[in-house]
Image: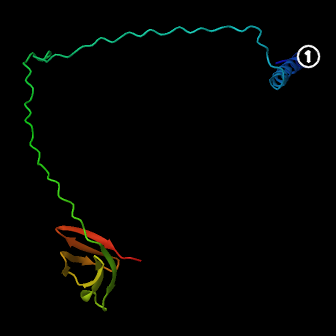
């Protein structure tokens, strides 16, 4: 490459010029002087005209354009749905589950249930005023009244 002092005379001014340009760019970026806009131009907007779409309808297909056969739509028969009659909601009497009394074995458990303000001691499959005790545990009981069942949690 360049030998001796010739390289120093050429490369040193080039390095100084490059570093000077970089420093000038940094100083110019952080200066407080903003460029001043000398002329203000008015801008006007034109309204956009829209075209109304053409209305069309699709006619029935008589022939298949690729096979040349006559098109016959599949026959659909209306399905008769099962009419569901709404069951009347049964209005349950006022019921509160108060607790459980049992011996060591859980087979002879007696449940304390308040039905319409009267306390009843009931075993499983016992009934009182159309309310039958179906299932029970220490935390909840399941009662049946006029064909519908409902679960009641213990009162705290």
Across and down, in percent, residue 46 comes to 53, 8
Q: Residue at x 20, y 79 (%)?
A: 128
Extreme residue in the front direction: 117
Q: Quadrant of the N terminus?
A: top right
The answer to whether 87 appears left or right of 8 in the picture is left
Q: In this orientation, which residue lies closer to the viewer: 121 or 108?
A: 121
Q: In this orientation, which residue lies closer to the viewer: 116 or 19?
A: 116
Rendered view: 106 above or below 84 = below
Q: In this orientation, which residue lies closer to the viewer: 74 or 123?
A: 123
Q: Quadrant of the C terminus?
A: bottom left
Extreme residue in the bottom direction: 103
Across and down, in percent, residue 56 comes to 24, 13
Rendered view: 23 above or below 99 = above
Q: Secondary structure at mark 1?
A: helix
Q: Which residue is mark 1?
A: 9
Q: Residue at x 20, y 17 (%)?
A: 58
Q: Residue at x 14, y 51 (%)?
A: 84
Task: Describe the colour scheme in one phrase.
Answer: rainbow
Res 109 → quadrant: bottom left
Rendered view: 109 above or below 144 = below
């Amino acid at each position: 490459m360049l030998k001796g002092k010739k390289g120093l005379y050429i490369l040193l001014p080039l390095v100084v010029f490059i570093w000077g340009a970089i420093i000038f760019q940094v100083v110019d970026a952080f200066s407080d002087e903003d460029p001043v806009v000398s002329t203000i131009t008015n801008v006007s907007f034109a309204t956009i005209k829209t075209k109304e779409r053409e209305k069309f309808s699709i006619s029935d297909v008589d022939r298949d354009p690729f096979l040349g056969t006559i098109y016959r739509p599949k026959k659909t028969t209306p399905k008769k749905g099962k009419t569901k009659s709404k069951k009347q909601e049964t209005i349950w009497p006022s019921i509160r589950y108060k607790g459980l009394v049992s011996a060591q074995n859980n087979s002879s458990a007696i449940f304390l249930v308040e039905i319409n303000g009267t306390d009843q001691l009931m075993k499983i499959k016992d009934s009182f005023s159309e309310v039958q005790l179906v299932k029970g545990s220490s935390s909840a009981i399941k009662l049946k009244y006029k064909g519908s069942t409902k679960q009641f949690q213990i009162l705290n």
